[in-house]
Amino acid sequence: MSDRHPFQGNWVARLYERVRERGFDSLTAFAEARPTASLVALAKELGPDDIAGVQVFKGLVAEAERHNQVTRLVRGQLVRELWACLPSGWPAVLDDANRFDVAHALGAWVAFTPETHKERADKAGDALLATPPPPGWLPLGPDDELLRTLLPDETV
């Protein structure tokens, strides 16, 4: 165990050092190899005591912005939130308990969405609620067909 706080020292260098130690040349490649893992799970794998989920996300956003893949990152984060909040997939019935779980997933997702994509994320969330996916739907990654329909990649 380390006594180091996640934001102590050069956490960006520490984050990328851990990613390289695991055989990846980018944080995005590391995260995409674990498309359903939460940000907290990714952080714990990289450093259980000195890496935080928000640091992982900041790094992912920076890489996505550099490579013009923010929409893909946003879809990927929705996958992570759905797996965390709806481990059995999209509910067949939106009763109070299920509605809360869906709202939790969508709310957490929009909270993590970069400002440039919040409006698109809000509309995608509204579309999921208006026309729910099949019961049990749980995307395996950012290239899920329904997710790509809701949030298509930007055309350059």
Image: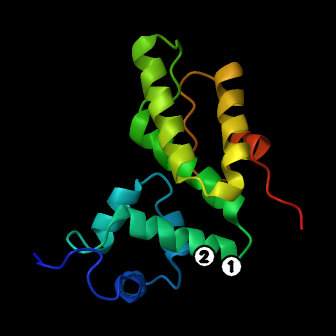
Residue 140 seen: no
Q: How crowded is mark 1: few (under 14 residues within 10 Å), some or many (20 or more)?
A: few
On screen, residue 40 above or below 28: above
- Asked if 70 appears above or below 96 in the picture, the reply is below
Question: Taking 91 as reference, is 150 above or below it?
Answer: below
- In the rendered image, the residue lying farthest to the front is 115
**The quadrant where residue 119 appears:** top right
**Mark 2 element type:** helix
In the rendered image, the quadrant that contains the N terminus is: bottom left
Please count the marks in the image: 2
* Horizontal relation, residue 72 to residue 2: left or right: right
How dense is the environment of label 2, judged by Cα within 10 Å: few (below 14), some, or many (20 and up)? some
**What residue would you read off at disc 2?**
63
Q: Name the residue under label 1.
A: 66
Residue 69: horizontal and vertical position, in percent?
71, 67
**Which residue: 43% across, 23% down?**
100
Residue 6: x and y in percent read 27, 74
User: As rendered, which of 4 and 76 lies closer to the eye?
Assistant: 4
Residue drawn at point x = 50 percent, y = 76 percent: 27
Of residues 73 and 92, the one nearer the viewer is 73
